[in-house]
Image (cartoon, helix red, strand yellow):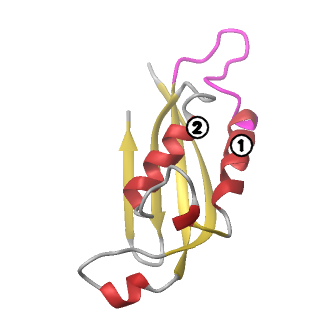
Amino acid sequence: MNYALSQKFFFDAAHTLKRHIEADSSLRIHGHTYNAEVFLSGQPDPHTGMVVDLGLVRLEIEQLRKQLDHHMLDDIAGLGPATLENLCHFIFRNLAPRLPALSSVRVWRESMGDGCTLSK
């Protein structure tokens, strides 16, 4: 059996986006509340009974969240255009070295009804 753990978090951020549809509003600085969830999978350690200590997961997420929350996403090095796809990749790429059990990342905007999931 394989276990899957998850931890949710959110951040508020602003950005612009060059696109053909809804171009005028997307080019103006605007913001969203982004929800994110990271998933970790594996076998529990026989001594601790945990795949990974969720306290450690929360610490790593908080470090990453500080880079995103109340920031202009356009200015974040390594993110690229502030799409849901790029946010998933950015979060995955930044957490994976410290959380080897990371298996997928989901980012969504509840108010818009859209989301993206990136899986290993």
Q: Is residue 22 left or right of residue 73?
A: left
- Mark 1 or mark 2, which has the lower sequence index? 1
Does residue 59 sit above or below 85 in this rendering? Answer: above
Determine the residue located farthest toward the top in the rendered image.
46
The crowd level at tag 2 (other Cα within 10 Å; few <14, some 14-19, many 20+) is many
Q: Amino acid at mark 1?
A: Arg
Q: Find out whether residue 50 is within the magenta segment.
A: yes
Quarter placement of the C terminus:
top left
At x 41% / y 60%, what residue is drawn?
Answer: 84
Q: Determine whether the residue tagged by mark 1 lies in a helix, strand or loop.
A: helix
- The percent position of residue 34, horizontal first and vertical second, equals 54, 66
- The percent position of residue 97, horizontal first and vertical second, equals 58, 28
Q: CA distance from mark 1 to mark 2?
A: 11 Å
Q: Amino acid at mark 2?
A: Leu
Q: Which residue was labeled with disc 2?
A: 95
At x 39% / y 82%, what residue is drawn?
Answer: 26
At x 72% / y 10%, what residue is drawn?
Answer: 47
Q: Find out whether residue 79 is within the magenta segment.
A: no
In the image, which is nearer the foreground, mark 1 or mark 2? 2
- The percent position of residue 100, horizontal first and vertical second, equals 55, 24
Does residue 12 sit above or below 103 in this rendering? Answer: below
Q: Nearer the viewer, residue 94 or 18?
A: 18
Q: Nearer the viewer, residue 90 or 43?
A: 90
* Chief secondary structure of the magenta portion: loop
Range of the magenta residues?
A: 42-55
Snapshot quadrant of residue 59: top right
Q: Which residue was labeled with disc 1?
A: 58
Quarter placement of the N terminus:
top left
Q: Is residue 50 left or right of residue 73?
A: right
Snapshot quadrant of residue 115: bottom left
